[in-house]
Amino acid sequence: MSQSLASFAKINLFLHITGKRLDGYHDLFSLMTKIRLADTMTFTFHGTGVTVTCDHPMVPEDETNLAHRAATLFFRSCEKQKKNISVPGVSIDIQKHIPVGGGLGGGSSNAATVLSALNARCHDPFSRNVLMEMGQQLGADVPFFLYGKAALATGKGETLNRVPKPIPRHVVVCDPGIAVSTARVFQNHDLCLTFSKEYTIETASNILSAGQDVDIRPYLHNDLEAATFRVYPEVRVARDQIAQLLQRRVLMSGSGGSLFALFSGEKNARHGYDRLLAHWAVGKKRVFLTALQQG
């Protein structure tokens, strides 16, 4: 029996790097929300083992794939904790729509979707909190996708504070066709360049609960842009081109290289989307018209 699920992307409305940890990770202060852009994951439950297939040439299909690792971790955790489950194996097919290496959390979202799907199929042997603890073993963004709501992420991204539901906003996401290495970006990040303004949970709450007549652009920020632009200058070129065409602020999500612009109305968002399709999206460049997830 097969089951298909959407595996949603995310954007960082702001991302501040507040320090470097002893474990090699960086401390973050980031407002994250899902968007409706999603991969399609199809699960076929069977006897034993884990297999993964994907239609994107840059996504591995072996044990290094995050979806594969998530399924393996789930089954091993069941065995270790002596959970009696009726589904000992799964085949996972991933249809990629989220840009790979784009800072939109596609791999982490896939891993979280695997954990959630297997847990539901096996009649919920683990609580959501336990699944989030598993997710931490796979990647810093995985707990956010299991959390399921807009959140203020701190620590290395695993500590999540609930914030009000995002106001409806349309999003134009631009993929310049550049797969960015998060590790390389963080290695090139200069903490001295970190934006110094104090931010609090209340700040995040105010942004998300603001009315549509409130300008949220002053809050948009990404500390990793400077490092990404140094390592991948073509991302900066794409950002500048898109901002010129849209005549509005364009921000990078996560470590890049995907870029996004927010719109309060669908008509203006579609106009911007059409303009980019006509004047920017050539070759490997892609544009998506989407929206913030409401819950």
Image (spheres, rainbow, N blue to C red):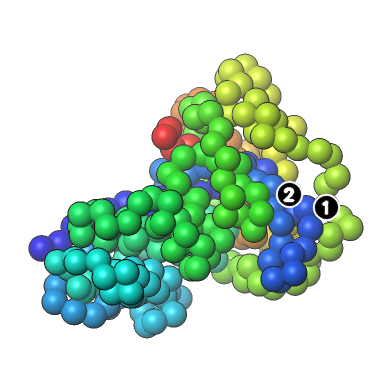
The residue tagged 1 is: 194
Q: Nearer the viewer, residue 120 or 239?
A: 120
Where is residue 245 drawn, in percent x and y? Answer: 64, 42
The residue tagged 2 is: 16
Q: Tell me the quarter of the picture where residue 157 sits.
A: bottom right
Where is residue 94 drawn, in percent x and y? Answer: 32, 66
What separation in Å lies between label 1 and label 2 (alpha carbons)?
7 Å
Q: Are marks 1 and 2 in contact (CB under 8 Å)?
A: yes
Name the kind of residue labelled 2 in the image: His
What SS does tag 2 mark? strand
Dot 1: few (<14), some (14–19), or many (≥20) neighbours within 10 Å?
A: some
Q: Nearer the viewer, residue 88 or 95?
A: 88
Where is residue 141 drawn, in percent x and y? Answer: 53, 57
Q: Is residue 235 visible?
A: yes
Could you say which disc has been placed on residue 34 in the image? none
Q: Earlier in the sequence, mark 1 or mark 2?
A: 2
Number of callouts: 2
